[in-house]
């Protein structure tokens, strides 16, 4: 039974028309594994594979990083969308027109409210840069003298914020937004010295950051002058995750798809410069190294990449770290555009399209980059350089998922170093020891797992136990929701997930995706209830002894408490099926 708050019509029609295997298959290669399918998880550096997708349950779960849910939550996480945006995206894929009037949950309404706050900020910043005052004039002059055009400023909605503690805070208050909402959206910071808030971005050029559906969800700010830090970025929020967001992907994904290749840069200005110089198939990381999640998104759009980071040591190291992310996601060709020390992509782009094309055309393949970087870092020490290169190459080669490609790159790396192929092959990992078996699940988790797999047993089991018998607060919350749902008859896992927050839904998804081999579900449920009750009885016994001892033997209700405890023990502490 779907909840009314979720707008049964639209959500259920889209859910029924959506195949989770088809959705996740657009992001990860899935192969059959019994009743399920498995693949490399796009949310972390997976090599197992650890991602399991259940066509029967329409759920996914990664046993490596713990991400799990349904088709809606997968698209929300993967593309950085709100629930409403994910609903519209999946409806579009399924060819289903959405009806107006479906009501959203409080969490979804909150996200939509925060999205409105961020858009209000984008308009405020944008208006500041276009104002007719000395501060705005100086900022525009700085950007134009750097080489950006007015067309670029307008197309990418660049903005400006004054060097004031509360200019946006005051504007947002006039627009009807509360300071706590602004804080939740990452736009203001709570003062450590008092109850107030102040603007996060002050005295900066502002770069709006879009999510996959074209909505502004965050900002990057570049200091005007010599302010520190030079770049300041929005924190992660419910709308924005820097690990899954790529600056410029929304605008340039068409160009990336047409070219079949993508240039990856580090900074907002670098992207604008490269884009303005005529290279449209470009994206930028958002104030961080290329994360595994972002690499998974990129690998869905292209298989050929050129890394174009700064030419200083930090940029070269960031390039090396990013290689593993792309290679693990199936990138067939990764090259590196090597810049001069102190040079960045914006500098090259400012020299003109020909200068930029020369760098991109001269990009070297990733093994050559790794070897050259090792030689640069160990100049004058040939043996040290070779050993360092081998050490860097081994995990990168291991990250390549296809054996044929891995074999090719092994030979390429060995040729560059002039050593046998075997020397760049990583040693085999030791087998898992017998003592590495995970511990048994607590009784209440086992009960929850059984009720998720066999919801028909829920009514009887939940009537037998009290929530006070359950220690784990998360299990308590889920059982409470189950007790509400079961009043209307058996429920599905999907209906249960609809009622839970993200953390509790994650636990349910993990247990739902775990194997369940009970031949007699009713008996397994009775045994699980019995185990929970026995554990609760042991706890009650211990607590009763402590109370009696603390009272000096004068605990007034001791006799009644002992009587109830003995009766419960007679009922539950006996063999299954005993009289």
Image (spheres, grey):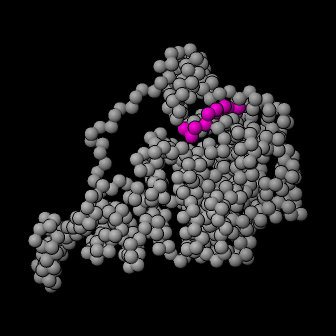
Residue in view at x 82 percent, y 60 percent: 129
In front of the other: 484 or 383: 484
Residue at 75 percent across and 32 percent down: it is: 360
Residue 295 in the image: x percent, y percent?
60, 44
The answer to which of 16 and 530 lies nearer the viewer is 16
| Furthest residue toward right | 132
In the displayed structure image, the side of residue 247 where residue 52 appears, left or right: left
Q: Residue at x 84, y 36 (%)?
A: 353
Q: Is residue 413 visible?
A: no
Q: Is residue 410 above or below residue 524?
A: above
The x, y position of residue 406, in whole percent, is 53, 28
Q: In the picture, residue 218 is in which quadrant?
A: bottom right
Membership of 332 in magenta stretch: yes
Left or right for 112, reference 447:
right
Q: In x, y percent, where is residue 337?
A: 71, 31
Q: Specify whether 429 is left or right of 546.
A: right
Q: Is residue 220 above or below residue 147?
A: below
Q: Is residue 185 left or right of residue 65?
A: right
One can see residue 178 in this view? yes
Quarter containing the C terminus? bottom left
Q: Nearer the viewer, residue 426 or 488?
A: 488
Q: Nearer the viewer, residue 491 or 396?
A: 491
Magenta span includes 108: no
Up/down of 576 relative to 256, above or below: below
Outermost bottom residue:
556
Number of marks drawn: 0
Q: Residue at x 71, y 48 (%)?
A: 253
Q: Which residues are magenta?
A: 328-337
Q: Is residue 486 above or below residue 303?
A: below
Q: Measured from the top left, where is residue 461 in percent x and y? A: 28, 72
Name the quadrant containing residue 571: bottom left
């Amino acid at each position: 039974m779907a909840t009314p708050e979720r707008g049964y019509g639209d959500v259920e029609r889209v859910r029924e028309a959506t195949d989770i295997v088809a959705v996740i298959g657009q992001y990860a290669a899935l192969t059959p594994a019994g009743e399920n399918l498995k693949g490399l998880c796009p949310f972390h550096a997976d090599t197992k594979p650890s991602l399991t997708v259940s066509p029967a349950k329409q759920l996914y779960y990664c046993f490596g990083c713990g991400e799990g849910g349904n088709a809606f939550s997968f698209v929300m996480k993967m593309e950085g969308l709100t629930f409403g945006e994910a609903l519209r995206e999946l409806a579009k894929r399924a060819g289903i027109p959405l009806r107006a009037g479906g009501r959203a949950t409080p969490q979804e309404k909150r996200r939509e409210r925060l999205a409105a706050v961020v858009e209000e900020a984008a308009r405020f910043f944008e208006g500041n840069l276009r104002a007719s005052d000395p501060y705005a004039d100086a900022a525009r002059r700085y950007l134009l003298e750097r080489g950006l055009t007015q067309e670029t400023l307008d197309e990418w909605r660049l903005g400006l914020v004054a060097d004031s503690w509360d200019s946006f805070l005051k504007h947002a208050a006039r627009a009807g937004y509360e300071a706590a909402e602004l804080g939740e959206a990452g736009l203001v910071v709570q003062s450590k010295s008092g109850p107030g808030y102040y603007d996060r971005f002050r005295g900066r050029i502002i770069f709006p950051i879009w999510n996959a559906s074209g909505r502004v969800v965050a900002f990057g700010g570049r200091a005007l002058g010599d302010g520190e830090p030079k770049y300041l970025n929005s924190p992660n929020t419910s709308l924005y995750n820097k690990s899954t967001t790529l600056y410029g992907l929304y605008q340039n994904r068409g160009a990336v798809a047409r070219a079949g290749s993508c240039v990856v840069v580090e900074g907002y200005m670098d992207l604008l410069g490269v884009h303005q110089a005529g290279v449209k198939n470009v994206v930028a990381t958002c104030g961080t190294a290329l994360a595994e999640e972002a690499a998974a998104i990129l690998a869905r759009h292209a298989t050929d990449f050129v890394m174009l980071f700064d030419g200083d040591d930090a940029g070269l190291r960031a390039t090396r770290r990013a290689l593993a992310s792309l290679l693990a996601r199936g990138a067939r060709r990764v090259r590196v555009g090597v810049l001069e020390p102190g040079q960045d992509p914006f500098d090259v782009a400012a020299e003109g399209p020909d200068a930029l094309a020369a760098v991109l055309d001269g990009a070297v393949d990733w093994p050559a980059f790794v070897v050259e970087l090792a030689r640069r870092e160990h100049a004058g020490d040939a043996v040290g350089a070779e050993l360092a290169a081998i050490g860097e190459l081994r995990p990168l080669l291991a990250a390549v998922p296809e054996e044929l490609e891995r074999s090719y790159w092994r030979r390429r790396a060995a040729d560059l170093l002039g050593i046998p192929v075997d020397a760049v092959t990583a040693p085999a990992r030791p087998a898992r020891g017998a003592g590495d078996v995970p511990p048994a699940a607590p009784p209440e988790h086992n009960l929850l797992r059984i009720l998720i797999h066999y919801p028909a047993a829920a009514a009887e089991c939940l009537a037998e136990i009290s929530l006070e018998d359950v220690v784990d607060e998360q299990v308590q919350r889920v059982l409470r929701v189950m007790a509400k749902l079961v009043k209307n008859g058996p429920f599905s896992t999907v209906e249960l997930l609809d009622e839970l927050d993200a953390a509790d839904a994650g636990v349910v998804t993990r247990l739902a995706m775990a194997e369940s081999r009970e031949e007699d579900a009713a008996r397994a449920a009775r045994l699980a209830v019995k185990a929970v009750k026995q554990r609760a009885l042991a706890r009650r016994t211990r607590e009763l002894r402590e109370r009696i001892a603390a009272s000096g033997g004068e605990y007034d209700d001791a006799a009644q408490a002992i009587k109830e405890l003995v009766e419960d023990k007679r009922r539950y502490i006996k063999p299954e099926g005993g009289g």
